[in-house]
Image (cartoon, grey):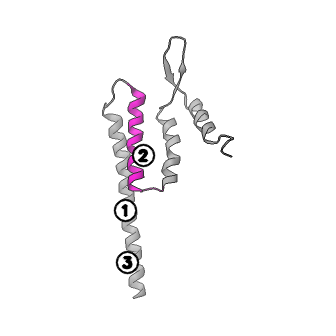
Amino acid sequence: AVLKSEFEHEEKHRKVFVWNVRFVLLAFALAAVALLVPALPHDAHAHRCLALLAYVTVMWTTEAVPFFASALSIPFLVIMMRILRGPEDASGVRHDLSAEDAAVKILSSMVDHVIF
């Protein structure tokens, strides 16, 4: 009886793992579709942010990855997807922040001295 119980326990964890992998793939696929389909054609930043929102929504609702892991992936994806805009220049245009500037801005807000 003990061996059967252990086998059933391992089988249950294997099935959960397979479903979690499927949910992660679904999240990436949904984000890719959101990036490729021009839902917000006039604002590229909003379009990329919508793709990030689709990814995070699937990750958090399915709990495929622990919340803290998917939450820590958000700043990385914001930098990689070039979602942040810089300040307006003299002509009133806001350009994308470079990866270095975006990383400094995000990480400085994450490790604020008030928090620690």
Q: Secondary structure at mark 1?
A: helix
Q: Which residue is mark 1?
A: 18
Q: Position of residue 28 (x, y in %)?
A: 38, 46
Where is residue 50 drawn, in percent x and y? 38, 36
Q: Is residue 58 magenta?
A: yes
Q: Classify 10 Å Cα crowding around label 2: few (below 14), some (14-19), many (20 and above).
A: many
Q: Is residue 38 above or below residue 74?
A: above
Name the kind of residue labelled 2 in the image: Val
User: Farthest residue in the front direction?
Assistant: 114
Three-letter amino acid code of the residue under disc 3: Glu
| Cα gap from disc 3 to disc 1, whole angstroms | 15 Å
- Residue at screen point 34% across, 44% down: 30
* Residue 49 magenta: yes
Q: Is residue 33 left or right of residue 66?
A: left
Q: Earlier in the sequence, mark 3 or mark 1?
A: 3
Which residue is label 3 attached to?
8
State the image coordinates of residue 49 (x, y, percent, origin top left).
Answer: 42, 35
113, 46: nearer the viewer: 113
Assess whether mark 1 and mark 3 are in contact (beta carbons under 8 angstroms). no
Q: Are marks 3 and 2 in contact (CB under 8 Å)?
A: no
Q: Position of residue 116 (x, y in %)?
A: 68, 46
Name the chief secondary structure element in magenta: helix
Q: Is residue 73 above or below residue 11?
A: above
The residues colored magenta run 43-66
Looking at the image, residue 55 sits to the left or right of residue 112; the answer is: left
The residue drawn where x is 38% and y is 49% is 58
Residue under label 2, please give it: 56
